Image: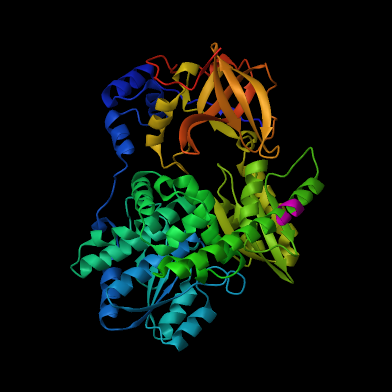
């Protein structure tokens, strides 16, 4: 298990006591809220309620775009929704198509092929749509950088609406078309995913038509899928949309989503952000990664139960194929990393391979960035050119990094955490050197060490089912609202046993003369400390469901030999009432 640097934000014990009293929560949850900047009881209460929303009038440009779409719908204009091939793009397309169908519009869609079309709106696609008779082109999850393509579409007689959430071009140029974009439109929740932007847009269409936007709430399941899968910040309205959407997903009537949960072995009544992130999202993504995303879109649109089951099985097979492909690329990429040598690893990695699948390299880049704590770009070479996908780490803006290296690139785009690019094969090494040099200037040595941010320091007797259930009120977890990290300062591990073919471990944690059961995933039996050795350790505490039985479970995050310097574990001890039903076994 990789070593991490513990970071324990200060919190005032008086704030913790005040929060605990005002909200009626445990001192552990009060610690978490205080350390996450929610020491004010009303702000904390609002966060726990997760019901923040903003009026459509706060979204600049949305209502005029909605009115124009409604007018085209009423005039029987042929409307084409141009989406993207990932979960966010597919869900965005489905939301708009479903809404336009409901008001009788003549609507079809186009999802680009990752291999032949690449990302976003392209000139060949614009020309084909014009020949097809499209009168109104609506982009979702793309288009904000397509200045020339939008101009070409308008020159060919098409009206265009751009709906997107990605960063505009570095030169500041925007498409000459009505634009629905949370940043450009000054919307209070600037980090909406594309599906949430599309959802706001169709609400605007409904309002323009004199209908109740709440009629569209049955598509909140698609908003939640995209919000979680696209890893946007789960705060503010995003948090509210994700929570409401997960409830909608649990009771969804869409045959495709119910079939997808069935093949993924997800109980709809227990669907949560992990089910979306690790089971449903990857299966929807698999279609666009390896083949075409149209099958995933059909899954979300079909009302035919039998067809839904068939497509869900196809996506399940595609996801299995994706995992095998990913593993092969990862082995090759790791070999390249090893060849770069130690003891002076680069600050950023650019790796390339001739047989790498362009639809999978982004996943591998994410895995490598997480493991090696470096920004990573992987490039699938195809003759004289290559397509790349990069993932970053906290503290490094990948889009800014690519902008600094733009002289070596044919095109690029994305955001601070993830980006795509196209490059000539002959410039790959120059790109690798330039990105490494830029990262060396931007990143400090501390940035390259994983930080384990501790939310609460707990005693063994506070750990139990009641606390596990209480902490679940902070869900959904994700970017901007990570799972809770609980520190036990006097842990001793014992009875460590392998499980899951040796990939994982189960063991006992002893603290203050009580024992607790725990597991560790992905590290084998290497837990960071030896059995019987005093340790400081962090865990998540979750409610584990197995064979109809619910029980609390500790999941190890990081462990280090004790003692830890007192200066790093000073503030806000978790003195206070202990919760009942602790996860303890008497000694």
218 lies above or below 66: above
34 lies above or below 132: above
Q: Position of residue 230 (x, y in %)?
A: 48, 54
242 lies above or below 459: below
- Quarter of the picture holding the C terminus: top right
- For residue 68, side relative to residue 485 (left or right): left
323 lies above or below 12: below
Q: Residue at x 33, y 47 (%)?
A: 240
Residue 71, by quadrant, is: bottom left
Tell me if I can see residue 222 in this picture: yes
- For residue 76, side relative to residue 378 (left or right): left
- For residue 94, side relative to residue 309 (left or right): left
Residue 213, by quadrant, is: bottom left
Observer-nearest of 163 and 17: 17
Membership of 307 in magenta stretch: no
- Provide the residue span drawn in magenta: 328-332
Question: Is the magenta region chiefly helix, strand or loop?
Answer: helix
Q: Residue at x 39, y 82 (%)?
A: 158
Observer-nearest of 80 and 431: 80
Tell me if I can see residue 143 in this picture: no
Q: Position of residue 62 (x, y in %)?
A: 30, 64
Q: Position of residue 195 (x, y in %)?
A: 40, 60
- For residue 577, side relative to residue 306 (left or right): left
Q: Position of residue 402 (x, y in %)?
A: 60, 56
């Amino acid at each position: 298990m990789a070593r991490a640097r513990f970071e324990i934000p200060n919190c005032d014990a008086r704030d913790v006591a005040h929060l605990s009293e005002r909200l009626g929560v445990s001192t552990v949850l009060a610690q978490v809220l205080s350390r996450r900047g929610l020491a004010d009881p009303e702000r904390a209460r609002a966060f726990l309620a997760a019901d923040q929303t903003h009026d459509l009038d706060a979204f600049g440009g949305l209502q005029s775009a909605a009115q124009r779409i409604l007018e085209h719908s009423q005039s029987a204009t042929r409307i084409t929704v141009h989406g993207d091939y990932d979960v966010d793009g597919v869900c965005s397309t489905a939301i708009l198509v479903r809404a336009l169908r409901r008001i009788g519009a003549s609507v079809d869609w186009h999802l680009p092929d990752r291999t032949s079309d690449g990302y976003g709106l392209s000139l060949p696609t614009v020309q084909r749509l014009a020949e097809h008779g499209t009168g109104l082109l609506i982009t979702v999850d793309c288009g904000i950088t397509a200045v020339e393509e939008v101009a070409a579409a308008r020159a060919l007689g098409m009206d265009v609406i751009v709906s997107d959430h990605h960063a505009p071009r570095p030169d500041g140029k925007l498409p000459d078309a009505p634009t629905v974009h949370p940043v450009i439109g000054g919307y209070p929740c600037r980090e909406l995913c594309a599906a949430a932007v599309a959802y706001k847009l169709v609400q605007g269409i409904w309002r323009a038509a004199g209908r109740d936007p709440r009629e569209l709430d049955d598509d909140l399941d698609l908003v939640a899928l995209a919000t979680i899968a696209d890893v946007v910040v789960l705060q503010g309205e995003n948090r509210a949309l994700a929570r409401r959407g997960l409830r909608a997903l649990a009771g969804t009537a869409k045959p495709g989503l119910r079939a997808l949960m069935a093949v993924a072995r997800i109980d709809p009544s227990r669907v949560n952000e992990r089910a979306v992130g690790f089971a449903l999202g990857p299966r929807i993504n698999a279609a666009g990664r390896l083949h075409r995303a149209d099958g995933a879109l059909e899954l979300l649109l079909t009302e035919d139960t039998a067809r839904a089951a068939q497509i869900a099985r196809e996506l399940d097979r595609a996801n299995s194929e994706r995992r095998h492909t990913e593993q092969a690329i990862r082995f090759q990429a790791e070999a390249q990393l090893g060849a770069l040598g130690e003891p002076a690893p680069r600050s950023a990695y650019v790796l390339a391979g001739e047989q790498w699948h362009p639809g999978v390299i982004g996943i591998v880049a994410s895995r490598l960035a997480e493991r090696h704590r470096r920004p990573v770009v992987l490039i699938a070479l195809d003759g004289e050119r290559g397509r790349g996908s990069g993932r970053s780490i906290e503290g490094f803006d990948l889009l800014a990094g690519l902008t600094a290296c733009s002289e070596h690139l044919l095109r690029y785009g994305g955001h601070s955490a993830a980006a795509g690019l196209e490059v000539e094969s002959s410039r790959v090494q120059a790109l690798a050197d330039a990105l490494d040099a830029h990262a060396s200037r931007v990143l400090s040595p501390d940035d390259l060490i994983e930080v384990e941010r501790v939310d609460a320091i707990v005693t063994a007797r506070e750990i139990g089912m009641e606390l596990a259930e209480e902490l679940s009120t902070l869900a959904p977890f994700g970017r901007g609202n990570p799972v809770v990290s609980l520190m036990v300062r006097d842990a001793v591990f014992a009875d460590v046993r392998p499980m899951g073919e040796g990939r994982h471990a189960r063991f006992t944690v002893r603290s203050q003369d009580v024992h607790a059961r725990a597991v560790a995933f992905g590290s084998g039996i290497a837990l960071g400390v030896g059995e019987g050795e005093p340790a400081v350790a962090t865990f998540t505490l979750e409610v584990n469901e197995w064979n109809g039985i619910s029980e609390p479970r500790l999941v190890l995050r990081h462990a280090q030999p004790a003692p830890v310097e007192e200066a790093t574990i000073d503030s806000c001890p978790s003195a206070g009432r202990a919760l009942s039903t602790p996860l303890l076994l008497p000694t």
